[in-house]
Amino acid sequence: PKARKSEYELYTFNTWLFGEERRGTLDTELATVLSSISVACKQIAAAVGRAGISSLTGVAGTGENVQGEEQKKLDVISNDIFSLCLRNCGRTGVIASEEEENPIGVEETTSGNYIVVFDPLDGSSNIDAGISVGSIFGVYSPAEECIVDMDDPEKTLASCITNVCQPGKNLLAAGYVLYSSCTILVLTIGDGVYGFTLDPYVGEFVLTHDRIQIPEKGKIYAFNEGNYELWDDATRSYIDSLKKPELWDGKPYSARYIGSLVGDFHRTLLYGGIYGYPGDKKNANGKLRLLYECAPMSMIAEQAGGLGSTGTERVMDIVPTKVHQRVPLFVGSPAEVRYLESFTKKAQA
Ligand code: P6P
């Protein structure tokens, strides 16, 4: 991190936000939104860390969410925490959550009017086993057409998401928080990728990764090979090739997959390699959602020198049609993603 003036100087997330405001890379309104997200994630970190103690493991008993996944207690709690922080910061106009069927118009907006999409607790099936989970978010720029008519919110909300939340045009900020051996916030506002580790004694995120660069090439792939028989031939041939020692100077790739996108992605970002969730015979577009999983991770990857692809197109080029729209995702080092595309694009041709 930057040179410290004194051993007592703490380069916190808010210090960084003030610095970016001075540099003109973001305005005070967006800084307020990002600061409120960091508070939400500190609260979620505390809840996740104490899940077993305060009997927050297990299912919520609320049945399935819009994704058809059984909600965990912490899914509901994390969603409430995220929504409340975003409402109370007064700078958001629309929020869309993985846990909510429809986007929500925020009545507490005083200014800013940003659109925030988020997956409050991704990988929550890992919670009861104490395995890493994470929160993922994206902040889209405000737009006239997203100023919600509170007398008829439905009319505005759907069009707002599809017309405004275009990753390549309006995604201003993308980030995630990994709740693991450390709690780390990783963020880009379009000018590099930064990592902030939570200091539990101070309760602040402290800058620990200044302008993360993903390795050009890695040696790890993260795919759920349990789906191998469901994949298309191109994906299978790609994975088969990663295992051939003769193709890699006698050292084939290693497989690492923890079933939590944030954990698998964060390792890929720092160590290099590829994370993939392909389409398959059951779900042609795979499992991951464009707006609050694939687009934020792809923006971060690109800002760190990597790539985010569906196998046939750049994720950031996709214009969404639905808030929970799914797309295949291949994200990570340029070498691995380009090599994957050499299989998928050939098959497409
Ligand atoms: P599968 C978690 O449900 C998630 O959305 C990602 O965090 C994770 O990478 C993926 O799905 C795991 O899905 O089908 O491999 O269990």
Image (spheres, helix red, strand yellow):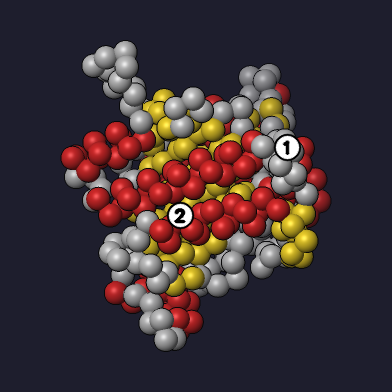
Q: What is the C-alpha distance between the residues marked 2 and 1? A: 24 Å
Who comes first in sequence, dot 2 or dot 1? 1
Residue visible at 77% across and 54% down?
59
Nearest to the observer: residue 280 or residue 77: 77
Residue visible at 62% across and 49% down?
122
Q: Which mark is residue 85?
A: 2
Tell me the kind of residue under disc 1: Ile
Residue visible at 19% across and 45% down?
24
The residue beneath circle 1 is 53
Q: Does residue 129 appear in this view? A: yes
- Work out whether 154 lies above or below 260: below
State the quadrant of the N terminus. Answer: top left
> x, y percentage for residue 268?
56, 33
Residue visible at 33% across and 27% down?
11
- Work out whether 197 lies above or below 145: above
Q: Does residue 296 appear in this view? A: no
Q: Which mark is residue 277?
A: none
